[in-house]
Amino acid sequence: MKKLIIAIDGPAGAGKSTVAQILAHRLRYNYIDTGAMYRAITWKVMKTNVNNDIIAIENIAKNIKIQLDYVDGKTNVFVDGFNVTEEIRNPAISRLVSEIAQIRAIRDAMLQLQRHMATAGGVVMDGRDIGTHVLPNADVKVFLTASIKERADRRWRELTEKGFIVNREELEKEIADRDKADSEREFAPLIQASDAILIDTTTLSIEEAVTAILKNCEERSSLV
Ligand code: CDP
């Protein structure tokens, strides 16, 4: 079977990374978590205290070394050689990341890196603008979504299990604000590509979502 390029987009908590990792594992593909890349750059912006200094932020975008190592179903994220895998999931990063992700110089730098990472094919890439902007020629495009309530419940469980104390209502508001910022930004907003299949996971299990995408992959690979 031809090695496909699979693009999965959607809002926070829709199940993108879980579904994408299972797909990558079953197909023996690489998994690229582009949200982790924006989180990594946000981590560096916070660490270096550049605040709103746009020139300093553009310099970070130019010089940052982000590495994603996807091994045994887990992505380790490195910034300039430091392992930031756990730290980038911190709620403080989640609150800032959408603002940082709107900066054009940052998006341009990530775009180049992400396209380069996909050149060999056999890849599942998830994010917000993959099917529309980063990989418009992807073989399979999926827009994964779920109700805001369900997405906030999932994220609350995830964070609580990791030991973070989070207010469920505040979290829902933060996710809604992030959805709005991601969907309304000027450049490469979160939007369903016209040729993407829509999967709503509000009442769908992970396995059902994976099965639907795999079926689409089989149909596509018989065509290509
Ligand atoms: O894990 P979660 O769904 O909360 O978000 P994420 O995938 O880690 O992405 C974090 C943020 O990065 C998003 O809210 C977007 O602001 C930004 N992002 C983006 O702008 N473009 C992408 N391709 C991926 C993420």
Image (tube, rainbow, N blue to C red):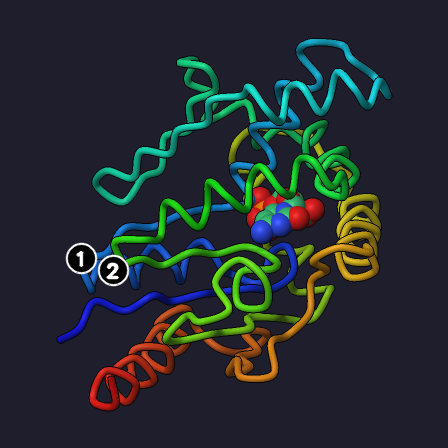
At which x and y percent is residue 88?
A: 56, 28
Quadrant of the rendering where the C terminus is positioned: bottom left
Viewer-proximal residue among 149 and 8 = 8
Q: Is residue 157 visible?
A: no
- The dot on residue 135 is none
Q: Residues within 10 Å of mark 2 (few under 14, many from 20)?
A: some
Residue type pointed to by label 2 = Gly
Quick check: is the Cβ at mark 1 less than 8 Å away from ligand 1?
Answer: no
**Residue tagged by mark 1?**
28
Q: Is residue 159 left or right of residue 182?
A: left
Viewer-proximal residue among 69 and 148 = 69
At which x and y percent is residue 7?
A: 45, 65
Q: Is residue 123 left or right of residue 200?
A: left
Q: Identify the residue at image location x=65%, y=60%.
A: 11
Q: Quadrant of residue 14?
A: bottom right
Q: Is residue 183 visible?
A: yes
At which x and y percent is residue 73?
A: 27, 45
Q: Identify the residue at image location x=74%, y=35%.
A: 100
Q: Label 1: state its secondary structure.
A: loop
Q: Label 2: state its secondary structure.
A: loop
Q: Identify the residue at image location x=30%, y=63%.
A: 23
